[in-house]
Image: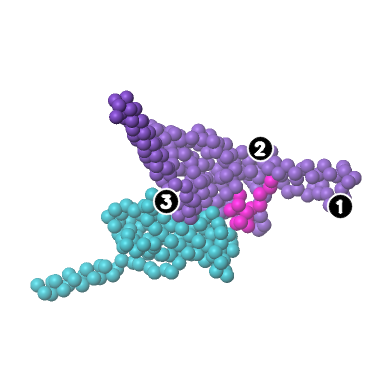
Chain colours: A purple, B cyan
Amino acid sequence: MKKSELNFNDVKLGFCFERIVRLSLLSLVLFSLVGCATKTANIDMHNDQGQAVMGLDYRDFQKAAGEAVSSMLQSGAVNKRGGGRYVLAISRVINDTMQRIDVRQLIKKIRIQLLQSGKVVVTTAVAGNGPEDQLAMQARKLRASDEFNQKTVAKKGQMIAPDLSLSGRIIQRVVKIDSSTQQSEYYFQLTLTDINTGLAFWEGETVIGKRGSSNSVAW
Amino acid sequence: MKLVLSLLFCFILIGCSMKQTVIDKRVSFIDEAWNSHLRLTNVLSIVGEDGYLRVQVTGFNDASSYQKLQYRIQWLNKSGVFITTILTRWVDFPAFQNSPFNFQEIAPSTKATSFQILIRENAL
């Protein structure tokens, strides 16, 4: 065999070997990435043993709403004298935290439970941030339309004005414990006001505290 | 000596038997292994003037360590059907060492006439 042919074969073999090593390494990286990926699983809402988070999660909303309703019912503030149900309007609930929170999530839980209690009915025609359901008022504009059977259009003076108003605020306080630990305190403050007198019939506060790494951002 | 020993034994027996404990089918501890130091002392349920059922559970933690516990209460109507409510959730409560513990709950509506309570250790 000639010397030049030998060199050519050596180069070809070396090139193949290099490719195999590269491919093996690539596969190894890919396999390890797949192996490290967190598996997605549905949360067991009845027994969630998942780690707490520095921000607010659904468990905190459940706790705050549950405590508020329980306290409201225990206080007797929603027991209407002479029986019957109070009409409740939702006023403003301010999110004063660093997190983006849809406070309706919290309020909805409270509303559902209060409605189920049989003591309160919520109006969607009047609210602190404008009516939740604008159609109740819009439907009244049909009085001017000849296209609608006027007997089926809502009559004047049928809407029920609210007796009570629910307002509140969610506050966050961040306290630095040391260079690596911080504490986030969340205060869910709610007030039930008698609209007629302006007096607060009930007030409640749920405090949720979390302590964790300063690196975990609570928003 | 035998008399003294037997008297001592009797005193220990009497002492142990004096620990007040109630058995109520409506309240149960999950996992018998860890709750050997916990006992129920009273389960009170009353219907208030407003028609709501109120429950108060009292117990005692005989352990020399603080225990972080949880309870979950399910409400039933007069037909024995469970009532779905956000008030049925695991609620934390403390049981301090060698001290009584208690918690109170109110039914979510006047339809609730009975209840079932589970108590467990808070694993978190």
Q: CA distance from mark 1 to mark 2?
A: 31 Å
Label 3: chain letter: A
What stretch of residues is rendered in magenta? Answer: A111-124
N-terminal of the pair, mark 3 or mark 2, is 3
User: In terms of secondary structure, where does tag 1 sit?
Assistant: helix
Q: Which mark is residue A49?
A: 3
Q: Which residue is mark 1?
A: A151
Q: Which mark is residue A129?
A: 2
Label 2: chain letter: A
Residue placed furthest toward the top: A4
User: In terms of secondary structure, where does tag 2 sit?
Assistant: loop
Task: Name above or below for residue A44 compared with residue A15.
Answer: below
User: In terms of secondary structure, where does tag 3 sit?
Assistant: loop
Q: Is residue A195 magenta?
A: no
- Quadrant where the N terminus of chain A sits is top left
- Is A195 displayed left or right of B56 in the figure? right
Q: Nearer the viewer, residue A148 or B45?
A: A148
Q: Residue at x 77, y 43 (%)?
A: A137
Q: CA distance from mark 1 to mark 3?
A: 56 Å
- Is B1 displayed left or right of A75 in the figure? left
- Residue A216 in picture, x, y percent from top left: 41, 35
Q: Residue at x 38, y 53 (%)?
A: B122
